Every structure is written in structure tokens, then in C-alpha cells.
């Protein structure tokens, strides 16, 4: 497995991870077996499971933080909770590295060949909702840090484990809240990713709700109404024309191509025999890192306004920003955090791991917005599709789980070792 000589301390780390293999797998199975669907967004049970396990592992200051209900209510979640724990080494205040993964998951949906909460292992793959996104990295990060205790006397600084439960709705109650309240104070951070690439940038995302208000009338006399659905068709056509133009914009970051636009929801009218007085859509506009989100929103609003005016000046428009997740990166490829993972992947697996961007958006942006260097790396395949992420039969390969744990642990060793 090891393609060239690795120093003795790193051998001890790798041996410890192998010794803990069955416990690592069992921990992930327990996480998968604990429902944490978001929505509805009540993850207290899995938070307790994690906190109890971290206490059992004797992590320092393991704390279950409750987010004030007033803040939770704004997000639409039922309850807000986070788990934070620390592993201290010599001179613990010299550097803090945060490992942040989320335990909330999208509901399992239909089409599963196994129980989505079973954690079944079939042909070397562990199945269940959250197995790949991203309960696996809760296990990876925990056991990577546990292995470092074998060489604790060689390390300085501290590691904070921050396990959060609101990634599926934006991460404002999780990493953002923890950073702003200084429950964690990272100099560097690692967030969930996959084993075959290191993500140093990702797209942003803007969600807009557009509501058009016309005038209701009886279908027998439609001339007395103002048809909001017909007006919305003009908006839709303008937006789809705009979408086709986005291909002309391209990112300079590998792994990221062009911005995208999807109109994901539409609702209008009250009955078949009534001229619809209202029609509402919600759209998803992905932003490449080079784009200014303020200008993009202004551009969209102008297009929508012009389409409505061209239809009828009597139509009223209401537009509301539902979500703005800013893009992050790119983090410099020469940064020590990036280079540590690149080097250890090469040493351990003899693979040149690509450093690239992702079209997704994640909690990592909350670290980047606070000027904290952050990358995405963890357990999983080359693509979400390969792991069935957010789909039936989501899974993670046990081999990838072990590889990621080893590479994270070796990289943390390089970053924290005494010089």
C-alpha cells in the first residue's frame, strides 16, 4: 500500500488507523442509523450520539451548543444544535485547525434497495442516507485525530472538531454561528469532500422568488382580468434566453465551467375557471467565483422587470432573495494545507490528486468569508453521481473511508509537527 518509505511517526499513525478500522466503520454505521433528515431539521438525537462518542474518546471540552430558538425559527428548522470538541497538543494556542462536517441529510426518498438507515455493508460499500454526504467525514475526521495521539509529543497546536447540522439549508446555524460566537477560532479548516480531488474553490448560489400579481376574473369573461400566468410566461422566456447566454461566461478555475440558471418551482392560479391573479416562481442561479453576486441579482431583476413591463404595466412584481451562498476561493495551490494533502496522497497512494473547483456550494464559504483558508477533502468517489449522493442507495466505499482517514491524519501531522 505504501509506495515509498514513510517516516516512523507516520507509520505509527497508519497502524493506529488500521487497528481502529472496525470501530471507525461501526461509528459511521451508528451515524447512518440515526435519522437526521433536514427538513424537518431536528438533529438533536444524532448530535447527542456524536457528543457521547467524543466524550468516550476523551476529547477535551466536548460541548453540545444549542442555537437560540429565535435564530432557528428564521431558517425554518425545528432545532439548532452543534457539537464541538478539542484535541490539544503542546503550545495549544499556536495554531487551531478546524475539521467541520455536517450530520444533517436530505430525506431518503424512494427507490432504495436497502433500508436507508441500515448502514448495510455490501461488496465493500456502506449504504445509507448520509453515508457519502457527509456523515462519513464525521467518522474520518474523528478517527484521523484519534490516531494522532500516538505521536502527540511531536505535535503543537490544537484541533477543533466542529460537527454541525444545517448544511442542507445553508450553514448559518452551524459553522457561521460557531465562528461568530468564537466557539471555534481556526487558523485553517477542512470541510467535507471526496478522496479523489481536493477542492480549493466552489460556486456560489442565488435563490430568488418572483411573484407576479394580476387581476382575478371569471374564465367566461377573461377580458376583465389580468392573467398573471401569461405574464409569467414572458418572464420565463426572458430567463431561458438569458440562461442560454451564460455559456459565454467561463471560469478560469479548473473544475468550474459556466454559471447556470434553473427555474425549479412554479405555482399559480386558484381554479381552472378563473383568470389567475398570481403566479410565483423560484429560481436557482449558480455563480462562478469570478462573479459579483450583487451585480448578478441586479441583472436578473432588470430582465424580469423588462419582461413584465413589455407584457402589461398593470402587473405588480414582488421579488425576494431566499438564499445567497457566496462562492469561495480559489485557495492558493501552494498553501501548506493544500500541499500537505497533495503530498500525502502521492506518498500513500502514488496518485497525483487534482486541485480544482466544484460547481456545488458548501459550508466552507463561511470560513473563507472570515479569511480562514479552507479546503474540501474527505471520504468518497470522484463524483456525487457515483456515490448516489442525495439519491437512493447512497453509499461510500470502505476503502475510500480508510484512505481519507489516513491522508487527513498524515496531513494534520505535517501541519502540526514541531519544527
Image (spheres, rainbow, N blue to C red):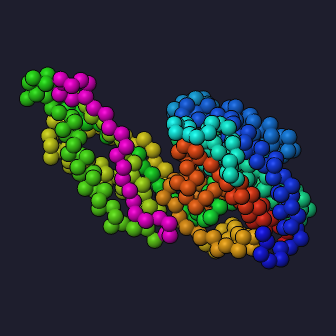
Answer whether residue 332 is magenta in the image: no
**In the image, residue 79 above or below residue 349:** above
Residue at the image position 21 percent from the left and 34 percent from the top: 228
- Residue 271: in magenta span: yes
Q: Position of residue 151 (x, y in %)?
A: 89, 62
Quadrant of the frame with the N terminus: bottom right
Q: Residue at x 82, y 47 (%)?
A: 23
Residue in the foreground of this view, choosing between 62 and 382: 382
Write down the quadrant of residue 164 in the picture.
top right
Q: Position of residue 89 (x, y in %)?
A: 86, 57
- For the record, the magenta segment spans 253-276
Relative horizontal placement of residue 232, taking residue 71 as reference (left or right): left
Residue appearing at x 75%, y 73% in the figure: 347
**Is residue 295 among the parts visible in the rendering?**
yes
**Residue 132, horizontal then vertical, whole percent:** 62, 50
Q: Is residue 185 visible?
A: no
The quadrant where residue 344 appears? bottom right
Q: Is residue 135 above or below residue 217?
A: below
Question: Foreground: 207 or 341?
Answer: 341
Among the 4 quarters of the image, the one containing residue 272? top left
Q: Residue at x 68, y 32 (%)?
A: 44
Out of 186 and 3, give the one closest to the viewer.
Answer: 3
Give coordinates of residue 160: x percent, y percent: 75, 51
Q: Is residue 160 above or below residue 333?
A: above
Amino acid at each position: 500500500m505504501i509506495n515509498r518509505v514513510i517516516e516512523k511517526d507516520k507509520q505509527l499513525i497508519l497502524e493506529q488507523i488500521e487497528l481502529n478500522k472496525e470501530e471507525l466503520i461501526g461509528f459511521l454505521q451508528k451515524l447512518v442509523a440515526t435519522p437526521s433528515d433536514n427538513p424537518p431539521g431536528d438533529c438533536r438525537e444524532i448530535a447527542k450520539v456524536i457528543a457521547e462518542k467524543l466524550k468516550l474518546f476523551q476529547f477535551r471540552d466536548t460541548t453540545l451548543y444549542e442555537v437560540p430558538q429565535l435564530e432557528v425559527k428564521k431558517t425554518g428548522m425545528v432545532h439548532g444544535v452543534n457539537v464541538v470538541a478539542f484535541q490539544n497538543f503542546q503550545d495549544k494556542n499556536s495554531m487551531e485547525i478546524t475539521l467541520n462536517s455536517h450530520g444533517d441529510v436530505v430525506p431518503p426518498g424512494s427507490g432504495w434497495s436497502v433500508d436507508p438507515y441500515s448502514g448495510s455493508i455490501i461488496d465493500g460499500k456502506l449504504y445509507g442516507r448520509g453515508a457519502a454526504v457527509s456523515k462519513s467525514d464525521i467518522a474520518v475526521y474523528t478517527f484521523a485525530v484519534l490516531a494522532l495521539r500516538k505521536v502527540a509529543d511531536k505535535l503543537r497546536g490544537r484541533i477543533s472538531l466542529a460537527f454541525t447540522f444545517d448544511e442542507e439549508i445553508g450553514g448559518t446555524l452551524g459553522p457561521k454561528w460557531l465562528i461568530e460566537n468564537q466557539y471555534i477560532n481556526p487558523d485553517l479548516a477542512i470541510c467535507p469532500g471526496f478522496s479523489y480531488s481536493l477542492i480549493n474553490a466552489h460556486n456560489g448560489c442565488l435563490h430568488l422568488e418572483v411573484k407576479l400579481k394580476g387581476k382575478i376574473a371569471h374564465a367566461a369573461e377573461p377580458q376583465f382580468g389580468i392573467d398573471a400566468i401569461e405574464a409569467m410566461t414572458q418572464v420565463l422566456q426572458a430567463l431561458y434566453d438569458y440562461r442560454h447566454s451564460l455559456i459565454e461566461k467561463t471560469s478560469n478555475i479548473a473544475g468550474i465551467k459556466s454559471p447556470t440558471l434553473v427555474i425549479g418551482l412554479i405555482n399559480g392560479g386558484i381554479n381552472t375557471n378563473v383568470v389567475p391573479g398570481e403566479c410565483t416562481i423560484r429560481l436557482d442561479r449558480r455563480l462562478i467565483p469570478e462573479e459579483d453576486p450583487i451585480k448578478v441579482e441586479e441583472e436578473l431583476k432588470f430582465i424580469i422587470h423588462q419582461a413584465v413591463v413589455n407584457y402589461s404595466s398593470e402587473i405588480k412584481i414582488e421579488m425576494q432573495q431566499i438564499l445567497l451562498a457566496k462562492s469561495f476561493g480559489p485557495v492558493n495551490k501552494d498553501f501548506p494545507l493544500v500541499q500537505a494533502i497533495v503530498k500525502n496522497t502521492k506518498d500513500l497512494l502514488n496518485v497525483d490528486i487534482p486541485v480544482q473547483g466544484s460547481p456545488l456550494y458548501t459550508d466552507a464559504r463561511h470560513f473563507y468569508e472570515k479569511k480562514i483558508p479552507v479546503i474540501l477533502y474527505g471520504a468518497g468517489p470522484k463524483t456525487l453521481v457515483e456515490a448516489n449522493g442525495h439519491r437512493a442507495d447512497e453509499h461510500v466505499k470502505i476503502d475510500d473511508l480508510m484512505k481519507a482517514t489516513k491522508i487527513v491524519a498524515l496531513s494534520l501531522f505535517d501541519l502540526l509537527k514541531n519544527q
